[in-house]
């Protein structure tokens, strides 16, 4: 049944604001209760942020004006952002039919860097090395067992080739074990090619019945594709594997080892085992990855949202710490933006926000991360890798303001800089939250001084 929520903001005699939500529905009594919450009063300093219940109805995340930057939004806001992110990631709507899902699986670009570098996979890097070592080690063990089998490869050339493959497998095990974790797509693609060609060249030297059992080793390579390579590479891998399986089944039939029915049945079982699970797992993983990535970006502007900003901070902090350079937090708020909406309309206001986001991203994006954290508020975190941080900061207001714009706007900018010798440096990535509060305070001062200026502090 539909539920209607009526919200009122009231000023109580004691001072705090009170938000009263009336929930009405054609339901039993537990759906018709009135919920009363007491909240702290908003900051009375004048700013153009969107009120808690925005009558303008502008798209995008709209936090309370007193909800400081860096804080989490409410669960309801996060759920709405996730729904918007899923629709944006899948062409404006969520594909639910099997053919639509399959088509989008094939056509959605694969972003290896985001999948592998994303912080949720960082704890798995050691496990990934272990899985690769296990897979190559299992192949090496099969190669050794084939050399000792009376039904294995015979002849000097065949035995020599298996020994060469075995030596290469041992070398790969040593490389994966002692070298840094592979972090490039080309490395994983090389492991896939090595596994496919190595397995094929060895099992084809065995009898067809034993070789068909060996094809199950291809499932390990399919798992590698599932998590780190694209759908098209996975399909190319499976096409090659199924040709090998069909060839082995044909040889078993031609050599009189199996009848036609037995050969077809064996080929279908092997093919389904090494193909079905990787395809299903890759589709599911792609859906989850696209959903997670879309939830980190603002729908209106395409820059990061609060969640994307928080996920990027750890990476930026690692870069700054490894290079011993400063980190700056910039809080940019468009001046008198409510007047823009009131005079030109919400569509033009959205266009202004998109323009400002694009300009700020072009200025700051290569050096860090830009996020839209409020209606007309942006937060940037940059690393001083080029040693020109003061110059970069001084260009922010000129980047936002262009007199030739149809709706020219200015911005108030607060900046907080953390240097390697700063006490905040020892706190780690959490120091960015402290710096964000300091930048927010400087932005308020810039706005109180008339706007269109940058004020900087050190923390």
Image (cartoon, helix red, strand yellow):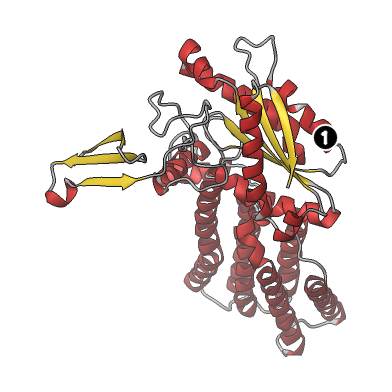
Q: Position of residue 192 (x, y in %)?
A: 71, 62
Q: Name which residue lies at 38% across and 25% down.
A: 55
Q: Position of residue 188 (x, y in %)?
A: 73, 59
Question: Is residue 116 among what the camera can see?
Answer: yes
**Residue ID for mark 1:** 390
- Of all residues, the one furthest to the front in this rendering is 14
Q: How many marks?
A: 1
Q: Position of residue 124 (x, y in %)?
A: 64, 67
Helix, strand or loop at mark 1 = helix
Q: Quadrant of residue 354?
A: top right
Left or right, residue 238 beside residue 190? left
Q: Quadrant of residue 225?
A: bottom right
Q: Is residue 119 depicted above or below 456 in this figure?
A: below
Near-viewer residue (454 or 60): 454
Left or right, residue 5 beside residue 27? right
Q: Name which residue lies at 80% across and 72% down.
A: 172
Q: Is residue 6 depicted above or below 258 in this figure?
A: above
Neighbour tally class for label 1: few under 14, some 14-19, many 20 plus, Cα within 10 Å: few
Q: Quadrant of residue 210?
A: bottom right
Assign the N terminus to one quadrant of the image: top left
Near-viewer residue (220 or 62): 62
Q: Name which residue lies at 50% across and 11% down.
A: 344
């Amino acid at each position: 049944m539909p539920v209607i929520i009526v919200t009122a903001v009231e000023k109580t005699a004691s001072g705090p604001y009170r938000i009263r939500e009336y929930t009405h529905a054609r339901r039993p009594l537990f759906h018709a209760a009135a919920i009363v919450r007491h909240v702290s009063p908003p900051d009375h300093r004048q700013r153009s942020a969107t009120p808690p219940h925005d009558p303008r109805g502008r798209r995008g995340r709209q936090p309370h004006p007193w909800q400081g930057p860096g804080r989490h939004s409410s669960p309801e806001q996060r759920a709405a952002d996730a729904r918007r992110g899923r629709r944006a990631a899948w062409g404006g709507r969520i594909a639910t039919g099997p053919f639509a899902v399959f088509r989008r699986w094939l056509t959605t670009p694969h972003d290896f860097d985001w999948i592998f570098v994303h912080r949720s996979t960082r704890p798995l890097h050691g496990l990934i090395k272990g899985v690769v070592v296990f897979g190559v080690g299992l192949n090496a063990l099969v190669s050794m067992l084939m050399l000792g089998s009376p039904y294995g490869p015979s002849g000097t050339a065949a035995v020599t080739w298996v020994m060469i493959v075995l030596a290469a497998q041992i070398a790969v095990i040593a490389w994966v074990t002692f070298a840094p974790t592979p972090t490039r797509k080309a490395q994983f693609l090389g492991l896939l090619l090595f596994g496919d060609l190595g397995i094929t060249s060895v099992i084809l030297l065995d009898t067809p019945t034993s070789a068909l059992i060996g094809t199950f080793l291809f499932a390990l390579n399919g798992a590698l594709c599932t998590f780190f390579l694209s759908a098209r590479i996975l399909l190319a891998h499976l096409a090659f594997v199924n040709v090998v399986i069909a060839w082995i089944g044909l040889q078993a039939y031609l050599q009189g080892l199996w009848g036609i029915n037995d050969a077809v049945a064996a080929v279908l079982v092997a093919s389904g085992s090494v193909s079905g699970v990787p395809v299903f797992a890759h589709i599911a993983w792609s859906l989850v990855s696209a959903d997670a990535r879309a939830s980190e970006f603002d729908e209106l502007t395409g820059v990061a949202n609060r969640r994307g900003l928080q996920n990027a901070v750890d990476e930026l902090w690692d870069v700054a710490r490894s290079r011993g350079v400063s980190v700056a937090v910039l809080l940019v708020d468009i001046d008198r933006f409510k007047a823009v909406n009131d005079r030109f309309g919400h569509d033009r206001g959205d266009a202004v926000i998109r323009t400002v986001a694009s300009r700020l991203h072009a200025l700051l994006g290569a050096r860090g991360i830009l996020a839209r954290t409020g209606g007309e508020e942006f937060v940037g975190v940059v690393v001083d890798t080029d040693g020109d941080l003061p110059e970069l900061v001084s260009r922010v207001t000129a980047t936002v303001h262009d007199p030739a714009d149809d709706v020219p706007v200015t911005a108030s900018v607060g900046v907080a800089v953390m240097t390697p010798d700063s006490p905040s440096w020892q706190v780690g990535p959490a120091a960015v939250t402290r710096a964000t509060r300091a930048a927010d305070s400087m932005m308020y001062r810039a706005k109180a001084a008339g706007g269109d200026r940058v004020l900087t502090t050190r923390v």
